[in-house]
Image: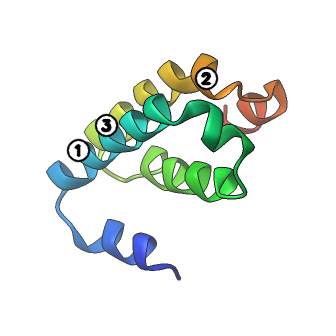
Amino acid sequence: MTLFSLLIKLIDWKTRFDAANGLAEIGKKSGDNLHKSKLQLKYFDYFTKLIQDSNIKVSNAAIGAFVDLIPTLKVDLFLINFLS
């Protein structure tokens, strides 16, 4: 289990909600660099954990943030189909 996974389970829902928006900001600021990075899959893993969160507010925030990032990150259609 990664440190991020552990933190997601331990922190309150408001912090996880803010994390979804924070991940979106990172993606918007470094979209091209992130797209070429080896860390891209790790970035999507973090989003997946927030999308699957048990709190509906956190999950909805993560889904909304991810949808906004699709054009920025040039996400493959395969990945979009996999997540839906």
Residue 54 drawn above or below residue 29: below
Q: CA distance from mark 1 to mark 3?
A: 5 Å
Q: Are marks 1 and 3 in contact (CB under 8 Å)?
A: yes
Q: Name the residue that disc number 3 marks.
A: 21
Left or right: 1 with respect to 16?
right
Residue at 43% from the left image edge and 50% from the top image edge: 50
Foreground pick, 70 / 5: 70
Residue 56 visible to an observer of this rendering: no
Which label is found at residue 18? 1
Residue at 23% from the left image edge and 44% from the top image edge: 18
Residue at 61% from the left image edge and 59% from the top image edge: 42
Quadrant the C terminus occupies: top right
Residue at 38% from the left image edge and 77% from the top image edge: 6
Left or right: 7 with respect to 75?
left
Give the residue type that dot 2 points to.
Ile
Residue 26 drawn above or below residue 6: above
Secondary structure at badge 2 equals: helix
Left or right: 34 with respect to 55?
right
Give the residue type that dot 1 points to.
Asp
Secondary structure at badge 1 equals: helix
Q: Name the residue that disc number 2 marks.
A: 70
Residue 82 at x, y = what percent?
Answer: 76, 38
Q: Are marks 1 and 2 in contact (CB under 8 Å)?
A: no
**Within-10-Å neighbours for mark 3: few <14, some 14–19, many 20+:** some
Which label is found at residue 2? none
Furthest-right residue in view? 78
Q: Earlier in the sequence, mark 1 or mark 2?
A: 1
